[in-house]
Amino acid sequence: MAIFRLTGIDNFEPVRAVPPRSVSEDALATVRDLDEREEMEPWIQGILCDTNRTPHGPSEIVDILTHKLVVRGREGLAAFILKGRSFGTVRPAHVSHQIFRLERLEGLRFAIFAATGNVLDEVKGQFVSTAKRLGCHYCILDAHDLARLFIAFGFICPRDGERLRSGRCSCGYSPANITSNLLQQEALREIATTHNLNQPAAAIILPTGAGKTRVAVLDVKRVGAQLCLYVAHSHEILESAENEFLREFAAEDIRRFEAAPAANEISRINLFTIQTLARNLAALDGRRVDYMIVDEFHHAAAASYRRAIETLAPKFLLGLTATPFRGDRQDVLALCNNNAVVCYELRQGIECGVLCPYHYFGCFDDIDYSNIHHNGQRYDINDLERALIIPERDAAIIAKWREKADGKATLAFCCSHLHADRVAESFRSKGIPAEIYLCSTDRDARAVLREKLRRGSLKVLCVVDVLNEGVDLPFVECLLFLRPTESKRVFFQQLGRGLRRFVGKEHCAVIDFIGNFQNAYRTVENLGLEPYEHGEAAPESAGSRSAKEILNLPAGCAVVFDERVIDIFGYQTLNPAFATRHNISRILIHQYRKVERRLGRRPTKLEIDRTSLLDSSLYELVFGSWAEFQRTLDR
Ligand SMILES: [Zn+2]
């Protein structure tokens, strides 16, 4: 059995570009200060994210991170024992339980011991002899190795050793973006099959942030299309698409049209808004369109899209969308011959590591929505404005932001121009740079604001109904939901804004202010990330599932509700008009956990009856019996 070194691990290949001598004392000091659970483990998981997860998760084998790894071309299961700042000197007593557990991992091929502090020889001996006995290749990484690793993958600044935030250092350093590509690879394989079968159209459904446009660009290049049209509904989407094309095509082959094109201006790659294209179809008269891409394809049912597609009759049509929901998808898919070649939703995006996990905080909001006029579809905007613009509320929002996401690049979703203005003003009054960003903000000014947010001179961008689709701000690490999110689609569009991967980004904080607005309880459903709309049948009820399955969160994600928020869900659920089969068991579990947090132990049936809104008979009804509910928690 052989010992291997850091540079032998193929998954860590970029490390080879960081010379050992380039590691500064400052970077070493930062590495010695890393927390094993909060930093080392998620960082390494982040680095490994685009390989397949193994069935052993950290939750099953406590304290050991397991993952598939490729070492010098050979693939196998690897186990990491990680020791950070809690262990200045690693002694046998600190690790013997972990070393012992290595023996219980079936099929282990690589064992890696990584410590930022001093490791006693006795510990090394114990680790090496166990690895040898198990027939594992093994490796010991020290602070210097870890510094190279974390510099190479953009977690630590090579200049001053600072931890990077939102993909940049305060000194201005920003590493090249590293993105993962699992869903893109699969989409490309599937489109290739479509081409092989000579099918004229396909649709790709990938979650926001998975990089759909890049898939289209790579495919256009692969098939060697000579006349390609890219169509979307806003200039901002065209701009980011143009950047994607620029990575693969020469600038002179790309034209982005702001106004009517002359026939001789048509280039190889042509980017249009649907409005411009629809008015100028004649400019393409007689030209053979090889490849047409319609981005945010769920808009394509609109008559102008249909007319463009019918008139131009492209040789191949590719639709891109993130919107997985039924209803507004049917006729759209028909335009692509119902040929959805890949269909992945947010959950799969997060679980395969292409998207960032979220940490969701459902915070109590004092607003009494029962006095705000609701027309059955939405709240009256003037009433809503009046209700939401309250200085005390802003203070609570800022306090929560400081607690959960201080200093992170943040998008705040507001209900109106005035509301956005006031929120931005409140942040500024506390010394936090904030600006508004609206549909009416002119395009150059918007680009400046996005750049400021990226560089960190701006912390909070207050937005209204823009940025819901298409615009790429991967460095955003916090979302503030400051208005009631009544529709599932908007909820997901907003959530998607924060989940794009970026160097040094572990998760996105989502801070949602939940009051007693209509449908607030649906938040519980949305966070289960199930593709079922209200009224559709869920596959089963509680039955024999575990609490974890019922809560149904993607790996790495966390959801915490304020106690008073759970009460709101409880009240709404008690109303038979609100309760649905798929949210009731989740709400009951959240409520049980709430009482458990307060008591510091599991509450009894009696305590639930005494202290909570929903009594134990409801638990029995939903789970079958109290004992069955307890088993659900244990499973
Ligand atoms: Zn720096």
Image (cartoon, helix red, strand yellow):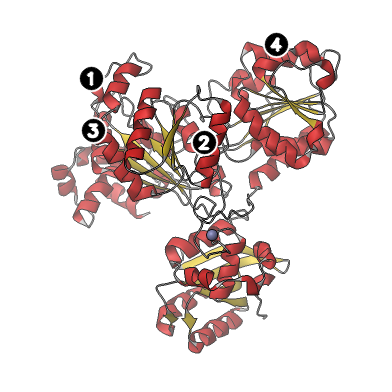
Q: Quadrant of the C terminus?
A: bottom left
Q: What amino acid is found at the position of numbered circle 2 in the picture? A: Leu
Cα gap from disc 3 to disc 2, whole angstroms = 31 Å
Q: Which label sits in the foreground, 4 or 2? A: 2
397 on left or right of 91? left
Q: What amino acid is found at the position of numbered circle 3 in the picture? A: Asp
Q: Residue at x 64, y 34 (%)?
A: 240
Quadrant of the displayed image that contains ligand 1: bottom right
Cα gap from disc 4 to disc 3, whole angstroms = 49 Å
**Mark with earlier residue (4, 3):** 4
Residue under label 2: 449
Would you say residue 77 is visible in this rendering? Answer: yes
Cα gap from disc 4 to disc 2, whole angstroms = 31 Å
Q: Residue at x 38, y 28 (%)?
A: 421
Cα gap from disc 2 to disc 1, whole angstroms = 36 Å
Residue under label 3: 366
The disc at residue 371 is 1
Residue under label 4: 279
Mark 2 vs ligand 1: CB below 8 Å: no
Dot 1 crowding, Cα within 10 Å, few <14, some 14–19, many 20+: few
Q: Residue at x 58, y 58 (%)?
A: 154
Q: Which label sits in the foreground, 4 or 1? A: 4
**Mark with earlier residue (3, 2):** 3
Placement of 223 over or under 593, stated as above or below:
above
For the residues bearing labels 4 and 2, Cβ distance under 8 angstroms = no
Q: Position of residue 236 (x, y in %)?
A: 60, 29
Q: Position of residue 347 (x, y in %)?
A: 52, 42
Quarter-wise, where is residue 384 in the image? top left
Q: Secondary structure at mark 2?
A: helix
Q: Quadrant of the N terminus?
A: bottom right
Q: What amino acid is found at the position of numbered circle 1 in the picture? A: Asn
